[in-house]
Image (spheres, rainbow, N blue to C red):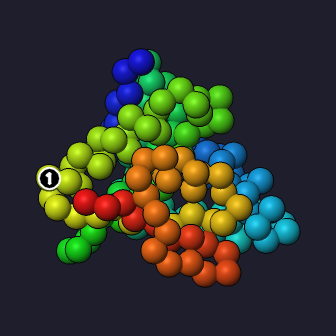
Amino acid sequence: MKVLLRKATDEDKEFLRDLNRIVYEEVVIEQFGSWDDVWQSNYFDEKWKAAGYQIIQVEGKPVGTLWTIEEKDHIWLRELQVLPEFQGRGIGTTLMKRELKKAKVRELPIRLRVLKTNRASHFYERLGFSVYDETETQLYMQNVI
């Protein structure tokens, strides 16, 4: 399966908004007890303004997003989202291995945060990430370079 990335355009905004809800709604409800459509929509709009979203494509079809930011001492993984029907097919693993190779060349760790109720933390652990900090609701993870 060929996994490609392309820069997100304005035409992708609604796909990304829907994707955000699809992948996070259940986790947010489990973590916080509810999903506030207005708050979440406003939060997405703020992320969109600042974002460097990339669209994950498989066979020309958008199936997710990847957004990283290179800081001076680490690479921040802001988003890795894959539509549920495409999860478990190695797409996220393929992309993270690519990102880990890039980070190794730059000699920078990749850092991220994930809600404690999000099963994605196990995905990152399998790829060599470990928790370096936490709050009441979130885990902060990084890989070892």
Question: Looking at the picture, how far across and down is residue 2, in whole percent?
Answer: 37, 21
Label 1 environment density (alpha carbons within 10 Å; few <14, some 14–19, many ≥20): few
Query: Which residue occupies the foreground of this view, 52 or 31?
Result: 31
- Look at the picture and state if 44 lies above or below 26: below
At 15% from the left edge and 58% from the top edge, which residue is drawn? 106
**Image position of 44 (left or right of 26):** left
Question: Looking at the picture, how far across and down is residue 125, in whole percent?
Answer: 50, 53
Query: Which residue occupies the foreground of this view, 15 or 102?
Result: 102
Quarter that holds the N terminus: top left
At 46% from the left edge and 63% from the top edge, which residue is drawn? 130
Question: Looking at the picture, how far across and down is residue 101, in whole percent?
Answer: 23, 46
Quarter that holds the C terminus: bottom left
Residue beneath disc 1: 105
**Image position of 102 (left or right of 141):** left
- Look at the picture and state if 12 lies above or below 144: above
Query: Which residue occupies the foreground of this view, 106 or 62?
Result: 106
**Image position of 40 (left or right of 72):** right
**Image position of 112 (left or right of 17):** left
- Whether residue 10 is visible to the viewer of this picture, yes or no, is no
Kindly give the residue lying farthest to the right in the view shown.
33
Query: Label 1's element?
Result: helix
Give the residue type that dot 1 points to.
Val
Quarter of the rendering containing residue 88: top right
